[in-house]
Amino acid sequence: MLAYIIRRIAHLIPVLLVLTVVVFTFVELLPGNIIDTLIGTEGNDDPEVRKILEKEYGLDQPIYVRYAKWLYRAVQGDFGNSLVTRRPVSLELLSGIPATVYLALVGITLSMLIAVPLGTIAAVRRNTPVDYTAQVSSLVGISIPEFWFAILCVLFFSLYLGWLPSSGYISPFEDFWGSLQFLILPAAAVGFRQAAYTTRLTRSSMLDEMNKEYVDTARSLGLSERKVIFKYTLRNAMIPTITISGLQLANLLGGTVVLESIFAWPGIGRAIFEAILQRDYPLIQAGVLVLGVIVVVMNLLVDLTYRYLNPRVKLG
C-alpha cells in the first residue's frame, strides 16, 4: 500500500507540472495584461510609466522566463500581490478556502446521509411505493437547477417564514451554533442535488450487487438478511458511490460560485469569479491552480479509498 501511494504521488508530479503550464498560458492569452489593469486603475497611460511597470512585473522578458520565475515562487506559496487589494494572493485565497471547504464538506455529508439509506432501502424494497418515491424524488432533484432551488430556499425559509438568514457567514470556530444558521440554506442547496445523483447510483449499485453469487452464498449459510445487506452488499456497492462523491466534493470545492454569490458566502469560488471581473490576473492564476491541485489530490484519495472498501480491488 505504501509503495502504491509513493508511486501515485510520483505520477502526480508531471500532472501538476502540466497543470501549471496550462494555467499560466491560459492567463497569458487573456485579452490585456497586468499593465492595462494597473494603468486603468491609476488613470495614467504614459508610455514611460508603462515601460517601468513592464520591467517591474517582468513583462519585458520572454514568456518561458516569466513562467519559470512564477513557478519557482508558486512552489514556495508566493503568488504575488492582488492587483485590487494589494494584499498577498496567498492570504486572499486562504481567507476563502476554509469557507468553501466548510460548505462543501457539510453539503456532501448531508447528501450522503440522505442518499445512501434512501438508495439502499429503494433497492432492498424494489418495485414498492418506497422505491417509486425514491426514484421520483431523485429525478426531481436532478431536474431542478441548483441556483433555482437556492433562490426558492431564500424566498421560503428566509423572506416568507423568517426562520433563517438569507446570506452571510460566521466561522464555526468563532460561533459554532451561529454559523449553523448561515450554513443550513447553502448546505441544503448543495446537498439536495448531489443527494439526487447519489441516491440513483446507490440504488443501481445495490441492485447489481444483490444479484451476484456471493449474496446467494451468504444467505445459504444462514446469515441474516440485515447482515448480508449491510456487511457485504452495501460495502461493495459503496465503491462507485464513494467515487462519485469524491468527484462531487472536488467539484464543489471549485464549482460553488453561483451558490456562494446567492448566499454571499465568502468562498474561493466567489473570490475567483470577482477576480475575473476585476482582471486580477495573479489571483486568477493562483485560484485556478489551487482548484486544480484539489481535484488531483481528491482523485488520489478516491483511489486509495477503493482498497479500504474492497480488498479485492487491485492497486496497480
Image: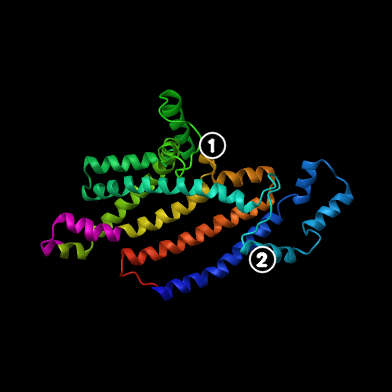
Residue at image location 43% in from the left, 32% down from the top: 153
Asked whether the residues under the numbered discs 1 and 2 touch, taking CB atoms below 8 Å apart as contact, a structural biologist would say: no
Q: Which mark is residue 72?
A: 2
Q: Percent from the top left, x then y, of residue 206? A: 27, 55
Horizontal side of 89 relative to 256 (left or right) equals right
Q: Which mark is residue 264?
A: 1
| Type of secondary structure dominating the magenta stretch | helix
The quarter of the image holding the N terminus is bottom left
Residue 197 appears in view: yes
State how far apart marks 1 and 2 are (Cα): 34 Å
Residue at image location 60% in from the left, 52% down from the top: 287
- Indicate the amino acid at tag 2: Tyr
Q: Which residues are magenta?
A: 219-237
> Does residue 70 belong to the magenta stretch?
no
Q: Quadrant of residue 140?
A: top left
Could you tell me which secondary element the residue under label 1 belongs to? Answer: loop
Q: Percent from the top left, x then y, of residue 99? A: 50, 45
Could you tell me which secondary element the residue under label 2 belongs to? Answer: helix
> For this rendering, which residue is in front, 272 or 239?
272
